[in-house]
C-alpha cells in the first residue's frame, strides 16, 4: 500500500488530543459509608463500571474515526501486480518550465504548484521506481533513469527557460523517452496554447495535470522594438519605437516605459492601456560618441516579467569602408567622397583583396567583365554588394550572377518604361521622403534589363511589374539595378539611394535577435589567430565558429547565449560585435487552454490543480494502474463517528 499524500500522515499526531482530554476529565471520588444507605453500595459500584466502559468505548470510536479520516486524506492505494508489470516501474514526468508558468494569483505561481506536485508525486511511488524528468530545455542527461531521491533533486534543480517547444515537439520527446520501457507518463503544465488544434501522435497513456486556470493571465508585454531611422553617426538624434500590449482583462494605468542607453536612463513615458489594447511609443535620445552602444527598454509588470525588457545594440562609425569598382570616374566618385565614407576606388583588374575584406559595401558600376578571382573574393567577403548592370552581358558577368544567386535577365529592353511603385519599407528610402506619398514623382527608364520578378524583393518597380532595383537575399545583402547610371543619375532619388546603400550596408543593424534563432555572421579579426568568445555568467563561452581565412571568422549563433541581454563578442580584449537577445513573445500572446480545448488537442481530459487547492493529485495512482482505497477510510471514519453518537445517546 502507498499514500499519494504522505505528508498528511503527520496529522496522526492529533490522535493524542482525545486521549489527553479523556485523562484530564477522569474524576476521583472519596467514598463515605452511611449505615442507612449501605444497601446502595452494590448498585453504585455497578453504575460506576458501566460509565467507565462507556467512556472507553466513546474514546475508542473517536480515535478510530479520526485515524481513518487522516488515512483517507493521505489517499492510500494498492498497486496491483498487473500495474507494476505493465509500467515496469518506470515513470516519465514532463514539467513545463517556460516563462508563462510564472503566472499565478499573486501568492503562488503555476510553476511553484507544478514543482511541489511533481515532488509529491515522486514521493508517492515505492523506492525501487525509476524516473525521467523532462522539460522544454535540452539537457543531455534528461533521458537517464533516476532513483527517487535523484529525481527529487532533479525537480528542485529545474530552472525556467526562455525557449519553448511546440506541443508536437513535446509529444515527440515523450515518445522517445518511453520507447525503451513500458512507462507511466505525467505532464504538468499550464497548457498554454501554441495554435495547434490537435497534437500529432500524443502518447495515449500520458496523464495531464493543469496547474493553473484557463484564459489569459494579466500581463503587459513589450512586443517589439525598431529604429524608424537607423542610427549611423554621432550627433544624430536617435528615435526608437516600441510596441506594448495589454493582454489582461483589466485596464493597466500609469505604465512607465523607460529607455536606457549604455547603462544610463535617457527618457521615460507613462501611458494607460485598455484591456487588449496595443500602443506604439516613440522614445528618443542624442547619440554623442562612436563605437558600440547597448540599450534596454523596460517596463515594470508582475508576475510575468520575461517580456518586460527589450535589449538592443548598434554601432556608430566615424566612416564606412566602401569599395567602388568601375572602368572610369563618374557621379559615384563625388557621392562617396563624403566624409561619412572611407572610399577606395579600383578598376576591375586592379582590386586589392585586403580592401574587399574590410569593405562594408562593394559597388560594381557597369562592369562587363568580372574575373573569376575577383568574383570569388567578392562572394567570400561577406560585404553588401550594389551591382549596376552594364548594357552588354558577358560570360564572366553571367557566371558572377550565378555565383551570387542573382537570376539572369531574360532580355534587354530599349523602350522607355516608367517606374510606378516604390517599396517604402526598404532601408534605401530611410529619411528620403518626409512622408509617404500616394503618387511620388518617379523616373522613366529608357533602356534596361528585364529580370524575372519571382523570388525577388523589389525596391523600385516598373509599371509592367518587373523590378528595376531589387534585393537578393542569398547570404549577403545584394542590390541589383537593371540599367546603367546614365538612365538614373540625374533623378533626385539617385543620391539618397546610393548614399543609403552604403550607410545601411550592414543590414541596417538589426537591433536584436530572438533566443534560439539561428544566425550566421562573418567577422574580420585582425592580428593573431584568436578564437571569438563571449562572457556569460562570469565565464568565457566559445560560440560555434570556423576560420574562413587569416582575417575572417564565421560564427553560427543559436543556443548560446540562452538568456536575454547584451553580450559582447570578443577577440582577445577587442570587442568585435554586441549580441543582443530577447525572449520570444509567443509566451505573451497565447492563452492557456480550457478543459475542452485540451480534450480536443490531446484526446484526454486533464486533472485540474488550482492555485488554492494545489498538490492534490487525486486519481493519479488510479490512472497509473493502482487501486485506490481512500474511500474505505472515509466510510470507516463515518461509521465510527455514527457509533460514537449512538453510544453517547443510548448508553446509560
Image (cartoon, rainbow, N blue to C red):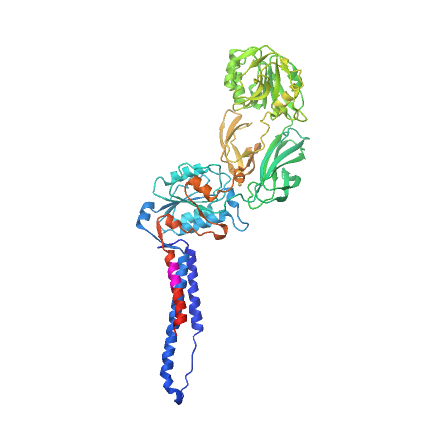
Magenta-span inclusion, residue 470: no
Residue 564 versus residue 51: which sits nearer the camera?
A: 51
Q: Residue at x 40, y 63 (%)?
A: 65
Observer able to see residue 29 = yes
Residue found farthest to the front:
650
Q: Is residue 333 above or below residue 196?
A: above
Left or right, residue 114 beside residue 346: left
Quadrant that contains the C terminus? bottom left
Q: Is residue 572 visible?
A: no
* Percent position of residue 188, x then y: 45, 45
In the image, 332: left or right of 617? right
Specify the principal SS of the magenta part.
helix
Nearest the eye: 593 or 165: 593
Compare residues 535 and 398 and report the one nearer the observer: 398
Residue 524 vs residue 254, the one in the foreground: 254
Please state the horizontal and vertical placement of residue 102, each as a whole percent of the image. 52, 45
Q: Position of residue 633 (x, y in %)?
A: 38, 59
Q: Is residue 456 left or right of residue 634?
A: right
Quarter of the view holding residue 424:
top right
In the rendered image, residue 634 lying in the magenta stretch gets the answer yes
Q: Quarter holding the N terminus?
A: bottom left
Vertical placement of residue 129 versus 19, above or below: above
Q: Does residue 390 sit above or below 44 in this rendering?
A: above
Residue farthest to the bottom, as pictured: 35
Magenta range is: 633-639
Amino acid at each position: 500500500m502507498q499514500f499519494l499524500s504522505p505528508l498528511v500522515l503527520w496529522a496522526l499526531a492529533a490522535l493524542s488530543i482525545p486521549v489527553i482530554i479523556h485523562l484530564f476529565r477522569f474524576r476521583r471520588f472519596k467514598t463515605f459509608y452511611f449505615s442507612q444507605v449501605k444497601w446502595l453500595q452494590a448498585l453504585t459500584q455497578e453504575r460506576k463500571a458501566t460509565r467507565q466502559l462507556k467512556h472507553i468505548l466513546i474514546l475508542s470510536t473517536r480515535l478510530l474515526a479520526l485515524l481513518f479520516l487522516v488515512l483517507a486524506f493521505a489517499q492510500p492505494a494498492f498497486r496491483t501486480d498487473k500495474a507494476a508489470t505493465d509500467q515496469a516501474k518506470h515513470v516519465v514526468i514532463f514539467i513545463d518550465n517556460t516563462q508563462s508558468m510564472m503566472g499565478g494569483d499573486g501568492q503562488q505561481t503555476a510553476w511553484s504548484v507544478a514543482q511541489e506536485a511533481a515532488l509529491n508525486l515522486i514521493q508517492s511511488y515505492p523506492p525501487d521506481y525509476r524516473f525521467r524528468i523532462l522539460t522544454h530545455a535540452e539537457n543531455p542527461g534528461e533521458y537517464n533513469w533516476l532513483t527517487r531521491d535523484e529525481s527529487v533533486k532533479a525537480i528542485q534543480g529545474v530552472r525556467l527557460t526562455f525557449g519553448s517547444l511546440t506541443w508536437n515537439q513535446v509529444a515527440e520527446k515523450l515518445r522517445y523517452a518511453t520507447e525503451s520501457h513500458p512507462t507511466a507518463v505525467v505532464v504538468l503544465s499550464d497548457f498554454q496554447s501554441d495554435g495547434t488544434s490537435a497534437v500529432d501522435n500524443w502518447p495515449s497513456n500520458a496523464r495531464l495535470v493543469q496547474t493553473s486556470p484557463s484564459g489569459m493571465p494579466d500581463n503587459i508585454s513589450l512586443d517589439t522594438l525598431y529604429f524608424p531611422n537607423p542610427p549611423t553617426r554621432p550627433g544624430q538624434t536617435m528615435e526608437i519605437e516600441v510596441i506594448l500590449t495589454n493582454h489582461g482583462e483589466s485596464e493597466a494605468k500609469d505604465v512607465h516605459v523607460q529607455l536606457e542607453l549604455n547603462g544610463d536612463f535617457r527618457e521615460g513615458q507613462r501611458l494607460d492601456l485598455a484591456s487588449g489594447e496595443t500602443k506604439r511609443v516613440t522614445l528618443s535620445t542624442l547619440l554623442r560618441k562612436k563605437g558600440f552602444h547597448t540599450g534596454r527598454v523596460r517596463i515594470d509588470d508582475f508576475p510575468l516579467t520575461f517580456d518586460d525588457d527589450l535589449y538592443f545594440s548598434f554601432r556608430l562609425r566615424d566612416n564606412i569602408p566602401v569599395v567602388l569598382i568601375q572602368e572610369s570616374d563618374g557621379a559615384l566618385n563625388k557621392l562617396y567622397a563624403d566624409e561619412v565614407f572611407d572610399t577606395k576606388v579600383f578598376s576591375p583588374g586592379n582590386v586589392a583583396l585586403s580592401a574587399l575584406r574590410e569593405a562594408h559595401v562593394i559597388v560594381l558600376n557597369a562592369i562587363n567583365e568580372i574575373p573569376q578571382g575577383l568574383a570569388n573574393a567578392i562572394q567570400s567577403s561577406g560585404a553588401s554588394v550594389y551591382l549596376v548592370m552594364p548594357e552588354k552581358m558577358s560570360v564572366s558577368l553571367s557566371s558572377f550572377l550565378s555565383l551570387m544567386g542573382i537570376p539572369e535577365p531574360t532580355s534587354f529592353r530599349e523602350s522607355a518604361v516608367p517606374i510606378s511603385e516604390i517599396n517604402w519599407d526598404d532601408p534605401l528610402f530611410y529619411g528620403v521622403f518626409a512622408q509617404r506619398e500616394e503618387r511620388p514623382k518617379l523616373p522613366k527608364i529608357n533602356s534596361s534589363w528585364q529580370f524575372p520578378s519571382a523570388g525577388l524583393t523589389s525596391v523600385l518597380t516598373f509599371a509592367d511589374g518587373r523590378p528595376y532595383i531589387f534585393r537578393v537575399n542569398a547570404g549577403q545583402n545584394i542590390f541589383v539595378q537593371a540599367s546603367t547610371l546614365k538612365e538614373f543619375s540625374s533623378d533626385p532619388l539617385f543620391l539618397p539611394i546610393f548614399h543609403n546603400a552604403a550607410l545601411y550596408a550592414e543590414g541596417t543593424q538589426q537591433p536584436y535577435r530572438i533566443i534560439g534563432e539561428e544566425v550566421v555572421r562573418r567577422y574580420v579579426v585582425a592580428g593573431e589567430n584568436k578564437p571569438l568568445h563571449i562572457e556569460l555568467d562570469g565565464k568565457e563561452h566559445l560560440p560555434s565558429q570556423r576560420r574562413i581565412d587569416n582575417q575572417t571568422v564565421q560564427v553560427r549563433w543559436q543556443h548560446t547565449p540562452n538568456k536575454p541581454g547584451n553580450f559582447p563578442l570578443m577577440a582577445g580584449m577587442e570587442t568585435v560585435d554586441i549580441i543582443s537577445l530577447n525572449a520570444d513573445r509567443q509566451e505573451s500572446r497565447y492563452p492557456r487552454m480550457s478543459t475542452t480545448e485540451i480534450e480536443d488537442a490531446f484526446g484526454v481530459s486533464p486533472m485540474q490543480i488550482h492555485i488554492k487547492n494545489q498538490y492534490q493529485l487525486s486519481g493519479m495512482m488510479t490512472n497509473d494502474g493502482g487501486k485506490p482505497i481512500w474511500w474505505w477510510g472515509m466510510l470507516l471514519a463515518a461509521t465510527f463517528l455514527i457509533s460514537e453518537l449512538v453510544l453517547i445517546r443510548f448508553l446509560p
